Image (cartoon, rainbow, N blue to C red):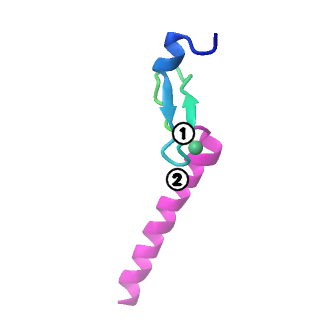
Amino acid sequence: SLLRDDTVARLRICPNCTWLFVDRSRNSSRLWCDMAVCGNRQKASRHYRRRMAANEVRNA
Ligand SMILES: [Zn+2]
């Protein structure tokens, strides 16, 4: 069965796209459904927001 106990225990919800995924990393530290997609997107948006804030300060 796909839904064995250890699988259910490692179910996560991606904070970026809210997809369910199974964390199969050795130390259960995975945050994203796909590091290459949601992990990078989250980092990029955080970086973008910081840049915007810096611009606002400079223009004030
Ligand atoms: Zn995701």
Tell me the quadrant of the picture where the N terminus can be found. top right
Indicate the position of residue 54 as horizontal and vertical percent values: 41, 76
Residue drawn at 36 percent across, 82 percent down: 57
Mark earlier in primary sequence (2, 1): 1
Whether the residue under disc 2 has CB within 8 Å of ligand 1: no
**Count of labels in the image:** 2
Displayed quadrant of residue 25: top right
Q: Is residue 14 above or below residue 51?
A: above
Q: Which residue is mark 1?
A: 32
- Disc 1 is placed on an element classified as loop
> Viewer-proximal residue, 19 or 52?
19
Residue 42 seen in the current view: yes
Q: Is residue 60 above or below residue 20?
A: below
Crowd rating for badge 2 (residues with CA inside 10 Å; few <14, some 14–19, many 20+) = some
Residue 46's x, y, as percent? 47, 60
The quadrant the C terminus occupies is bottom left
The kind of residue tagged 1 is Trp
Q: Quadrant of ligand 1?
A: top right
- Residue 30 can be seen, yes or no: no
Q: Which range is magenta? A: 33-60
Q: Position of residue 53 (x, y in %)?
A: 40, 74
Prevalent SS, magenta region: helix
Can you tell which quarter of the image residue 36 is in? top right
**Label 2 sits on what residue type?**
Gln
Q: Residue at x 48, y 45 (%)?
A: 15
Point 52% across, 48% down: residue: 16
Residue at image location 52% in from the left, 54% down from the top:
43
The answer to whether mark 1 is within 8 Å of ligand 1 is yes
Q: For the residues labelled 2 and 1, say whether their Cβ atoms are less than 8 Å apart.
A: yes
Q: CA distance from mark 2 to mark 1?
A: 9 Å
Does the magenta segment cover residue 27?
no
Q: Which residue is mark 2?
A: 42
